[in-house]
């Protein structure tokens, strides 16, 4: 880097919290290491990152890029490809104006045109793959990236081995900095501080199967000596409120459409029931939380099942298939939380899979590429 010239980084990707949280964590780590750094995000118009990134304090440019329609021969894909080329042209102008030293892609629609454009203009690229099964965008960018930061072993199936760096997934920093006790966390939800607690989360929008599993077993929950925190997701909150209004009250079930203070929710829980997104798994590993994973079947290449199996085969999580959840999820949660030896072994095994300081390690790799580029 020339003297007094700030480090300039483009970060691209998004679409889901699972892409956005790591992207913002990487940006925060770069700013921590290089306070003078200028960071510009590039996202997809109309997607979640256009709100979440500015809320985290960063500028973002939006592209009209969107995903391919299945099957691939659908005529609508002509418009999708036109938007891709339009996005690539737009992002080339953004790159020429911003003059980044490096481009970082985290997966999601906007990553493809951004990193393609950066590569064509000679800007070095780094990609971060969160899942154990690489996404389509990142696989397509593998040849153009100089470094590929991954969270699981065996990723040579998708990326050149000499480019891979095992870093783990960056997670939300506030979860690791939380100092609240288990008892205080339970009280913050209006729960009994001394009762064992199950936390059920289906992502910010919710998960229908997980929600149906709870609704179908309210009597089991009511009769147990366990308390539950249930995040329904905003999409399902009104239909669930209506269903619950027709039932007798369940005093040991705390129902929320969205949990903003996840640090308290995790601290309160003895067992976490979750989908198997990469960010959620990384958080559970770092916090050492016994977990029951219900992989979503509605994701590309069924990557959540592969994520969950990477833990369950090592005794670090219990896997309940989506198709079995309505029948067995609540009974599995109740039997697990009552088994002290099982809780201890799950916690011990899941901690072994945690990566610490992932965002800092990735930020260092970003800086190395930028410095090399600037020194040319």
Image (spheres, rainbow, N blue to C red):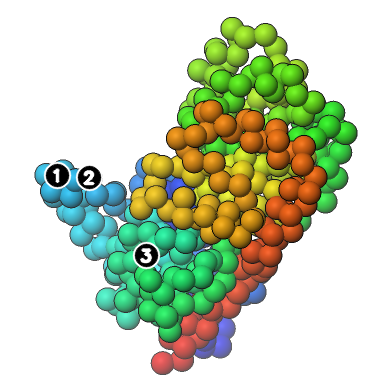
Image quadrant of residue 91? bottom left
Residue position marked by numbered label 2 in the rendering: 70
Q: CA distance from mark 1 to mark 3?
A: 23 Å
Across and down, in percent, residue 178 comes to: 78, 51
Q: In which quadrant will I find the C terminus?
A: bottom left
Label 2 crowding class (10 Å Cα cut-off): few <14, some 14-19, many 20+? Answer: few
Q: CA distance from mark 2 to mark 1?
A: 7 Å
Total number of numbered labels? 3
Residue position marked by numbered label 3 in the rendering: 138
**356 shown above or below 56:** below
Across and down, in percent, residue 63 comes to: 32, 53
Q: Residue furthest bottom?
A: 376
Helix, strand or loop at mark 3:
helix
Q: Are marks 2 and 1 in contact (CB under 8 Å)?
A: yes
**206 shown above or below 59:** above
Across and down, in percent, residue 310 comes to: 53, 59
Label 1 crowding class (10 Å Cα cut-off): few <14, some 14-19, many 20+? Answer: few
Image quadrant of residue 98? bottom left
Residue position marked by numbered label 1 in the rendering: 74
Residue at x-position 61% and y-position 68%: 358
Residue at x-position 45% and y-position 35%: 323
């Amino acid at each position: 880097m020339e003297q007094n010239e700030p480090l300039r980084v483009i970060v691209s990707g998004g679409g889901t919290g699972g892409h956005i949280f790591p992207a913002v964590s990487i940006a925060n780590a770069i700013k921590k290491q290089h306070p003078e750094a200028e960071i510009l995000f590039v996202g997809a118009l109309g997607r979640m990152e256009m709100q979440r990134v500015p809320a985290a304090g960063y500028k973002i440019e939006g592209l009209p890029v969107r995903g391919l329609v299945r099957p691939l021969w659908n005529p609508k894909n002509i418009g999708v490809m036109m938007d891709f080329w339009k996005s690539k042209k737009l992002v080339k102008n953004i790159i020429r104006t911003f003059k980044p030293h490096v481009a970082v892609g985290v997966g999601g629609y906007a990553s493809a045109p951004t990193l393609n454009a950066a590569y064509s203009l000679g800007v070095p690229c780094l990609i971060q793959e969160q899942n154990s099964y690489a996404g389509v965008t990142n696989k397509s960018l593998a040849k153009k990236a100089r470094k590929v930061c991954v969270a699981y072993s065996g990723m040579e199936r998708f990326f050149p081995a000499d480019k891979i760096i095992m870093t783990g997934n960056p997670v939300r920093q506030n979860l690791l900095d939380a100092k609240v006790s288990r008892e205080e966390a339970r009280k913050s939800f209006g729960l009994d501080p001394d009762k064992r607690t199950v936390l059920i989360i289906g992502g910010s929008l919710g998960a229908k199967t997980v929600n149906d599993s709870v609704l179908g077993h309210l009597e089991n929950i009511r009769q147990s000596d366990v308390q539950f925190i249930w995040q329904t997701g905003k999409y399902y909150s009104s239909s669930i409120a209506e269903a619950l209004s027709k039932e007798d009250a369940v005093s040991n079930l705390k129902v929320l459409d969205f949990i903003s203070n996840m640090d308290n929710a995790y601290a309160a829980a003895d067992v976490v029931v979750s989908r198997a997104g990469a960010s959620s798994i990384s958080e559970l590993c770092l916090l050492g939380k016994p977990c029951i994973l219900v992989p979503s079947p509605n994701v590309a290449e069924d990557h959540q099942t592969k994520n969950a199996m990477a833990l369950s085969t090592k005794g670090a999580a219990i896997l309940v298939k989506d198709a079995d959840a309505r029948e067995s999820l609540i009974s599995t949660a109740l039997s697990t939380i009552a088994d002290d030896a099982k809780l201890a072994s799950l916690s011990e095994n899941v901690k072994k899979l945690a990566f610490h300081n992932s965002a800092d390690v990735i930020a260092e790799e970003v800086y190395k590429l930028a410095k090399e580029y600037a020194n040319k």
